[in-house]
Amino acid sequence: MLANTRELHKKPLLQRTTILFWLGCGLIFLTPWLGLQFGATDLSWQQVLAGLLGEGSSHVERVVMDLRLPRTLIGLVIGIHFALSGWLLQLLTRNPLAEAGILGISGGASLVAVAAFVVGDWIQSGDNPYGGIPFALQYLPLLAMLGGLLAALTVYGLSLRKGGLSPVKLTLTGAVLAGMLHALTTGGLAFWGHAHTELVAQWLAGSLYGTTWAHLEALLPWTALGMIGVLILLRPLSAMQLEDEQARSLGLNLNRWRAIALVVAALMAASAVGIVGPVGFIGLLVPHISRRLAGSGLLVQFLMCTALGATLAVVADTLGRTIFAPYELPVGVVSAALGVPFFLYLLSRQP
Amino acid sequence: MLRTDRLTLAYGSSDVVHELSLAIPTGEISCLVGPNGSGKSTLLKGLAGLIAPRQGEVLLEEQPLSLWSRNELALRLAMLPQKPIVPEGILVKDLVALGRFPHRKWWQRDGREDREACQQAMYMTGVEALAERPVASLSGGQQQRVWIAMALAQQTDILLLDEPTTYLDWGYQLEVLELLVELNKSRGLTVIMSLHDLNQAAQFADHVMVLENGQIEAAGTPGQVITETLLAQVFRVRGVVSLNAEGRPFCMGHGTSDPDRPCRA
């Protein structure tokens, strides 16, 4: 009887991990294709292939290579950024509600980004109401990252008591700071009150609209850095799942590793916010879904998060572009609409 | 050897443990007993190096704990807190494997040696059959054995436990204590634990230390320490101490020693 139940517990788990792995690999290569094929004008798969190989018509080539391919790849990358950042933050605060938005990281990035719009507009104000925008966009990822990092370090500094850092205090401090930063951002926008607040508003809703190869180039170094960071953090993170005292008695230098994890999470979230604006739900949902599918192994969770985050962002953006074409729904809105029902389904299946 | 030298531990401005000097006998089972709020948990955390002393020292091998690196200390000394929180969704084998943390650097993955240590720890605690089960789905007694397995996988020669029997049914309490005795006998493990139940301390400990208001009231073998005077003075209990078949003291409480005395806050 006992041996029997053991077998039952063992087998599906092994098979499941393998299946999940191949499923993840398949998804991460197949979903971008959807992003390339569908949009305001649907292409056939032959056209997409021709466009990718540089053999299509100039129209197809422009749609595939200049518009959809960079946008789809950025979708993949920001999905990974938000998902991994949320996963790290949930682990290090041991709080299932933690993500970059709740901890004030997105708020800090947004505030600095909006300030950059305003200052850009002020420097290059002229007859053209959009004069300052290109200037601001150029430096946006870097500025937003500084803002996010600053917010993260402020939260960390404020919640650091002598001797240790309590996860509860970290979450509370983050939530308060996030509220304040959001108020400042909204206030700044109202104060600015120009015609092009619309553009900023769209950015603040989390949108991949108008992203280019340049954005991808700005983002990729941070993706690489973040992934390496997560791999380095895997082992310390496994001990961080335990209570602080237990983690320390296992020999973990808790404050140091927690700070490193926080910085990596902040860099990933804030650099993505700089490109597409704050997208909340990916960072909140994908880690939960990954944990339920992958079990307790952190390496599998990490791979799962990467695959699911990328997939969800691309699928959400493709749907957002096609459902109400030519109007666009921001990726943040669609990813929430897609992710929440699935999340609730997983919750209801939990014993 | 683990000992303290005029150790003062404090939270904020109030001392919880005051100028305490004690020595933990190596290779024996030591029990800390005392009323609630006497500083048992704080002293255990101090011994594990989790609280920095306000004054005095905790010394391991005559070296102050502050001179030990966290990792080196984790190779010598394992600590099990009173009611550890189980990480969400974690499996028994993965939790036990966390005990190997100090044996590997952050770039290393678990090797054969680590897997063997985990297997052995799970075998000794009788949880190998549960290896693939989520820890959260187990009973309190099984969970406690899994935690002990994790501490054993750490392969230290000193194990500190904060009230390992609280929240457990009677049968499970004895099971945990018998396991600790067995480990002490077979591996020479030095066990230091706080216990609520004086009779369990009397039955299982080699060395009993009585803590009251952050001071050691008495220390020695159960027979030397557990007396009717101690029951009255420290625990406010009027009772009888007799010897059982194994020559260990056995307490029977008949009532409080002075009903007029107000309860301690």
Image (tube, rainbow, N blue to C red):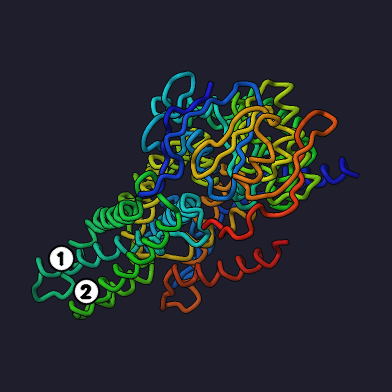
Q: Given the image, on which type of amino acid does mark 1 rest?
A: Gly
Tell me how far mark 1 sits from mark 2, CA to CA: 14 Å
Q: Dot 2 surroundings within 10 Å: few (below 14), some, or many (20 or more)?
A: some
Quadrant housing residue B75: top right
Query: Which residue is depicted at the point 42% across and 71% down?
Result: A330
Question: Does residue A33 appear in this view?
Answer: no
Pinpoint residue A321: horizontal percent, then vertical percent: 45, 71
- The residue identified by callout 1 is A120
Quadrant housing residue A70: bottom left
Q: Secondary structure at mark 1?
A: helix
Q: Report whether A16 appears left or right of A26.
A: right
The foreground one among A250 and A162 is: A162
Q: Secondary structure at mark 2?
A: helix
Quadrant housing residue B221: top right
The foreground one among A56 and A66 is: A66
Query: Which residue is depicted at the point 24% across and 76% down?
Result: A187
The foreground one among B12 and B90 is: B12
Residue A31 shows which numbered tag? none
Pinpoint residue A333: horizontal percent, then vertical percent: 46, 72
From the viewer's perspective, is residue B236 above or below residue B221?
below
Q: Report whether A332 appears left or right of A303.
A: left
Pinpoint residue A164: horizontal percent, then vertical percent: 40, 46
Pinpoint residue A169: horizontal percent, then vertical percent: 41, 58
Query: Which residue is depicted at the point 66% across and 52% down?
Result: B257
Question: Does residue A260 appear in this view?
Answer: yes
- The residue identified by callout 2 is A188
Q: Given the image, on which type of amino acid does mark 2 rest?
A: Gly
